[in-house]
Image (spheres, rainbow, N blue to C red):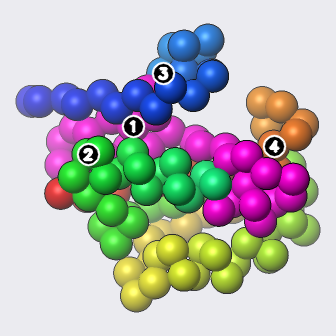
Amino acid sequence: MRIKRIQSGGEFEGKIGYCRAVAAGGFVHVAGTVGQGDDVVAQCASALDIINAALAEAGTNLENAVRVNYYLPDAAEFEPCWPLLSAAFGENPPAATMIECGLIDPKYRIEIEVTALAG
């Protein structure tokens, strides 16, 4: 089995020891991804951009997403992200879960994890 590891250069990859994404077994598994910005919507958009870049490097895209997990420290902040998420996944929405939990740093308002079919 061929495994492709994709690094994005994020600050936590080296500190913790993980890859942004791993392509293996016909799937691309994108690690939980936070974005930059002053609010949850900006961070959501930024995280989606980072995820899209990792998927593109693996030869796939969000149209092939089969699973997405959202992690937020405040579930009330999830609804403002819905228009972005609906636009990102379009006609091919994946199975999804939203979990309210603490994130690695309080400045982060959303973390997104995606599994997609390989290209």
Decide whether residue 80 is among the magenta residues: no
Q: Quadrant of the N terminus?
A: top left
Q: Who's the residue at 39% across and 45% down the image?
A: 54
Give the left or right position of residue 18, taking residue 98 as reference: left
The residue mark sitting in front, 3 or 2, is 2
Q: Which mark is residue 112?
A: none
37 and 31: which is toward the camera: 37
**Circle 2 residue:** 58
Q: Position of residue 52 (x, y in %)?
A: 43, 56
Gap between marks 3 and 4 measured at Cα: 19 Å
In the figure, 67 relative to 59: above or below? below
**Circle 3 residue:** 18
Q: Secondary structure at mark 1?
A: strand
Residue 85 figure quarter: bottom right
Kind of residue at disc 2 = Ala
Gap between marks 3 and 2 measured at Cα: 16 Å
Give the left or right position of residue 96, taking residue 74 as reference: left
Please report contact status of discs 1 and 2: CB closer than 8 Å, yes or no.
yes
Q: Which residues are magenta?
A: 19-45
**Circle 1 residue:** 21
Q: Secondary structure at mark 3?
A: loop
Decide whether residue 30 is among the magenta residues: yes
Kind of residue at disc 1 = Ala
